[in-house]
Image (cartoon, helix red, strand yellow):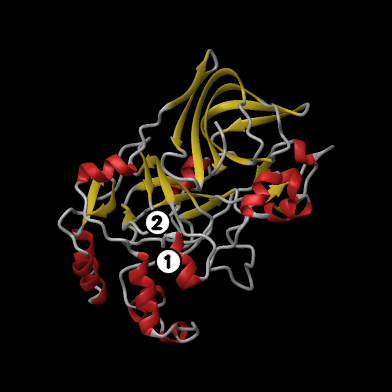
Amino acid sequence: MDLYRLPWRLEHNKVRGEGGREIDRFRGEEPAVDTMDGSEAWVGSDMRAFNATVDRPDLGMSFVQLPGGGRRLLSEMITAAPEQALGKAHIARYGQNLGVLIKLLDAKSQYTIQAHPPRDAAARLWHSPRGKEESWYILHLRDDAAEPPYIYLGCRENVSQAAFRDCCERNDTAGVEQMCHKFPVQVGDAFFIPGGMPHALGAGCLAVEVQEPSDLTVVPLSQRALMKRLFSAATEESRLPLEPEELYREKMLAGFQVVGMSAQEVLQLCKSRKPLLRKGPWGTEHLVFGPKQTDSFSLIRSEIRGEMPMNRPTAPEVLLVLSGEGELECGGQTLSLRRADELFLPCGIAEAMIRGGVTLLRCRPGGIEY
């Protein structure tokens, strides 16, 4: 059996953050509860989270369920046969890395206004080959949130870099929020977030996040204030290596790209219109994000009501089943599909068929023809 010509079923995980009840509900897991480390789940991940520890060195990394039992890290499967898993063209661009990261984010409470450095700042200040462009697809909304679910995205038109910087230097997070647009959201809404744009997922949102594979994040707080927020006990805080405050401030402020825009301009730039890619008696596919927004990743929504031959690129992709039931036939094997299933498709899969009534997201690295 050639595993690199078959789809790989991935194990569910959770990574960090307070929340997770809606992830449990989406996955059909009981009891569905919020925990202190359950609000993020990483899907199809070949990278570690920054908060990985000696006890959990593979935190954030996805495991493949092997046929016949057993498990192996997705990163190990890729490293064992990179050309079969990723393809020559992909390796030439991204190296032996998947080149994209997918997450489930369950915001029990609002996230802090934050930004992720664009590529030039990431290279200059973090020595990182990648910045962090990302996107949200709103999957579900909590029915017990204190207010209708929302997001913060982009700066209001009268906001200047100097005013934003002043709020950051005073640790005035409420002032930063007032400088940003606040948009109500509905299930199915999707937003692209350029590197450097201030943003925050609001309380009550369960979102699929597709992004460059980076864990770089800046928030408008001094390093000391940030450490106090992360670690309430001085003994814990003292264990962390601290950068000089001036270097931290330079990094934090360089991570935010403040461009004043009207609400309409932000939505024009960031909100997906989901153009139709193809349709047939089997259903439809819409391009949620692609080359018009970014060269870093793409996201396709497939609604299948029958028998759909997959339009496979010569590249890897990750599938996340949103709803329904069906089956995936590939290489003489049939794999059942149900809500919340996570699958990795190596580039060696040239032909595949999906049958049933199922809706899924297809996540790919950038630079792929459609």
The C terminus sits in image quarter: top right
Above or below: residue 312 compared with residue 29: above
Residue 69 falls in which quadrant of the image? top right
Residue 359 percent across, percent down from the top left: 51, 29
* Residue at the spot of label 2: 195
Q: Residue at x 38, y 45 (%)?
A: 192
For this rendering, which residue is in front, 12 or 299? 299
Secondary element under disc 1, as helix, strand or loop, is helix
For this rendering, which residue is in front, 175 or 228? 175
Amino acid marked by disc 1: Ala
Residue 12 percent across, percent down from the top left: 59, 48
Q: Residue at x 36, y 37 (%)?
A: 272
Q: Which mark is residue 203?
A: none
The answer to whether residue 85 shows anywhere in this view is yes
- Please rate how many residues cluster around mark 2, counting C-alpha atoms within 10 Å: few if below 14, some from 14 to 19, many from 20: many
Mark 1 near mark 2, Cβ–Cβ under 8 Å? yes
The N terminus sits in image quarter: top right
Residue 141 percent across, percent down from the top left: 35, 42
Amino acid marked by disc 2: Gly
* Residue at the spot of label 1: 121
